[in-house]
Amino acid sequence: MGMTIAEKIIARAAKASEAHAGNIYVVELDHLMSNDGTTHLTIDMYNKLKNKKIYDKSKLVWIVDHNVPCDSPKTAASQKKMRDFAKENGITFHEGDGICHELMIEKYVNPKELVFGADSHTCSYGELGAFGTGVGCTDYLYAMVTGKSWVLCPETLRFNLTGALQNGATARDLILTIIGRIGANGANYKAMEFAGPGMKNLTMSDRICICNLCVEAGAKTALMEVDDIAKAYLKEHGREAADGFVSDEDAVFEKVYDIDLSEIVPVVAKPHFVDNVSPVSEVEDVKINEAFLGSCNNGRIEDLRLGASIIKGKKVAEGVRFLVSPASRDIYDQAMSEGIIETFMEAGAIVVNPNCSVCWGSCQGVIGEGEVLISTGTRNFKGRAGDKNSFVYLGSAATVTASAVAGKIVKADMI
């Protein structure tokens, strides 16, 4: 029986000749990422161990990204604990460099790897042919101490893509459409694998956006084949342009979806669920109080370029706050050199440092009771971005920027 990409990666990590869905395997991890959302809890548990030992510190990457800059004495204490522990134990540490997933993709992840991250959107790494999955503090601690863990090999849902995106649609619209179609539980503990001739029409930024949101359909991980586009990205970021795994012709998929990219239209996810998806045309005229362009899903240079092209020569609508946060320091620097930051500032946007920002809903751009936010963030759950009685719509960089100018939710071609 052939194997899927997910099965091949797990077999490699388990040092087994093969792996198949439904079986449990003991695996070795290639990287272990943790951020300031929960690392202080992991440290507390570690300090209670009788035999304190880090299996391989070179595999650990710790990143402060959720509350940057620090917002309270409580947060300062937890981040200091993380900072001090990393220094004492020689753990690779980033603070102020950007969002954890963007940094892992830019600097660390390689094809065929199995990566645990103490954050649900670790599935982002699939665009590089790596099996990234989010874990809790207990599983993270065990892997940190032993270098191993167990994984139930998931079934795979295959998405065959054809054609190319048209009519103002973006990769963000594609993945939101898919989530709306299969539902928030449609891929529970499954691997979502993307393939087909349409892949060649998707940039690396597009691919990261797609893989990143797969957890919002319940996916264990997301995966793509490593083609020339992915290899070029690896090479540009100082890593070997290595091959990834490809699913065998006789691999078994739980279900196969055929998607024509040319049929995708701009959409939004309406409050309060990511699978509550509808075309933008059905929610136009919903007035907004705030717009956000950024996050690990849509904070890359391509997203900023798209937003800047829409807002150039225009102004943010009166009474609307428009926050922009590049996903990493490198992206921020590039946006500066291209004049993108200046374009946003001239339009009246608030450009902030690289961090989770409004998506996290804790330290920047928090919205009040009854307020409406249109966001490129990852979630729109009740209270996600502030008051429990606020409303969050999710959309593409194009939809968010156009809405910031119009003062209401609109498609980019409406301004």
Image: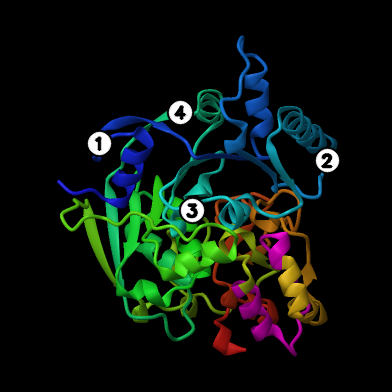
Query: In the structure shown, which secondary structural element does the residue marked by tag 3 occupy?
Result: helix
The disc labelled 4 sits on which kind of residue?
Lys
Residue placed at 49% from the left, 52% from the top?
A: 110
Q: Which circle, 1 or 2, is nearer the viewer?
A: 1
The disc labelled 1 sits on which kind of residue?
Gly
Q: Residues within 10 Å of mark 4 (few under 14, many from 20)?
A: some
- The image quadrant that residue 397 belongs to is bottom right
According to the picture, the residue beneath numbered tag 1 turns out to be 22
Query: In the structure shown, which secondary structural element does the residue marked by tag 2 occupy?
Result: loop
Q: Residues within 10 Å of mark 2 (few under 14, many from 20)?
A: few
Query: In the structure shown, which secondary structural element does the residue marked by tag 4 occupy?
Result: strand
Q: Residues within 10 Å of mark 1 (few under 14, many from 20)?
A: few
- Residue 129, x across and y down, in percent: 41, 55
Q: CA–CA distance between discs 2 and 4?
A: 35 Å
Residue placed at 39% from the left, 32% from the top?
A: 27
According to the picture, the residue beneath numbered tag 2 turns out to be 72
Residue 274 appears in view: no
**Per the image, is 320 magenta?**
yes
> In the drawing, what numbered circle is on residue 125?
3
Label whose residue precedes the other's in the sequence (2 or 4): 2
Left or right of 307? Residue 268 is left
Residue placed at 77% from the left, 35% from the top?
A: 83
Q: CA–CA distance between discs 1 and 2?
A: 45 Å
Residue situated in front as seen by the camera: 322 or 357: 357
According to the picture, the residue beneath numbered tag 4 turns out to be 148
